[in-house]
Image (spheres, helix red, strand yellow):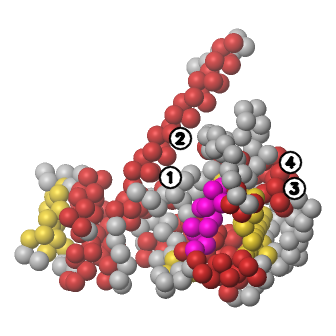
Amino acid sequence: MAEERKDAPIGGALQNLFGAGDENIRLLEHLMDVHIALRGGEITVEGPSAQAVDRTEAILSSLGALCARGERVDTAMVQYAVQLSEKDELDELQTLFRDVVATTFRGRPIRCKTLGQRDYVRAIKKNTLTFGIGPAGTGKTYLAMAMAVTALKAKEVERIVLTRPAVEAGEKLGFLPGDLNQKVDPYLRPLYDAMFDMLGAETCQRMQERGVIEVAPLAYMRGRTLSDAFIILDEAQNTTQEQMKMFLTRMGFRSKIVVTGDPSQIDLPRGRKSGLIEAVEVLDGVEDIAIQRLTHQDVVRHELVQAIVRAYDARALRAKEEYHYGRNAEEGCIVD
């Protein structure tokens, strides 16, 4: 027997809750297998069971509270609320958006959007060296940049150093004309994009001219000692073992390092082990070093990105299982 329940109206926040073209509610209906309607100023929930209706009501109430505080609710937030509900962690949604990590140069507050992101930011605050590992769209680089700008404004560091290995993502770019900056810019563009969002293009340019912000390929870190700096190594999965060791030993006094990477997108030549993978293995458990792993649930781009990440992860897992099954069969082992 279908359950039907009515929620109190949410007032001016109702349009925000429902989303453009009711996209938020349509997604919630799909994920929870319920029907949601607005009747006489009240939200009505119908579902196949009392449990489904109760959970949907709780999600609507939680999202409605965020709307009442002026938070913008989108499909990504709806999907994450459902995921939290499945883990009985829906209450965490209210505290998640209270802390502001940084503010963009246009005045927009930057907040963590998932519990994994919140743990990542807390790890950066607490530790001298933090590894942020996870798929695309989890905010690894963007949040690291936000923390770097915050530290710079608070005078905790004197400069920001941004670097990444100049490895082509499966493509041959050929000869690049221009001076050094023009040659490496294509590789460093994601770092520039985040930096411009935080500080604005003109401010960034002035800071670069004064040496407060430095953006350089990883190869130019050799032989240097970086003190009083917030250092971000992006796309670290494309570092070699030698490069990673070289980079980590550049740390000077009063510095903080964040290393970000996605082990599923390694572009090194076949047979070369990623320096990121080795570093995580070697440094796991070392004091003042945090290894924060983000998952598809921390993806804050279009909801389809989560599905894409899950599909690729599932395929990689099947390939790994098939590989071990084949090895065991070749060695004459009994495989159940």
Separation (CA) of disc 2 from disc 3: 31 Å
Q: Residue at x 67, y 87 (%)?
A: 153
Pointer 4 residue: 242
Q: Secondary structure at mark 3?
A: helix
**Foreground disc of the pair 2, 3:** 3
- Residue type at mark 3? Met
Q: Give neighbour class at mark 4: few <14, some 14-19, many 20+ (Cα, 10 Å).
A: few
- The one nearer the camera, 221 or 321, is 221
Residue 193 part of the magenta-drawn span: yes
In contact (CB < 8 Å): disc 2 and disc 4: no
Pointer 3 residue: 246
Where residue 225 sits, quadrant-wise, is bottom right
Relative to 266, say whether 102 is above or below: below
In contact (CB < 8 Å): disc 3 and disc 4: yes
Separation (CA) of disc 2 from disc 4: 28 Å
Q: Residue at x 55, y 63 (%)?
A: 139
Pointer 2 residue: 313
Relative to 235, say whether 145 is above or below: below
Q: How many numbered circles are shown?
A: 4
Q: Earlier in the sequence, mark 4 or mark 1?
A: 4
Question: Residue 159: image x %, image y %?
Answer: 76, 79
Pointer 1 residue: 296
- Residue type at mark 4? Glu
Q: Which residues are magenta?
A: 185-196
Q: Secondary structure at mark 4?
A: helix
Q: Earlier in the sequence, mark 2 or mark 4?
A: 4
- Residue type at mark 2? Asp
Q: Give neighbour class at mark 2: few <14, some 14-19, many 20+ (Cα, 10 Å).
A: some
Q: Secondary structure at mark 1?
A: helix
- The one nearer the camera, 76 or 105, is 105
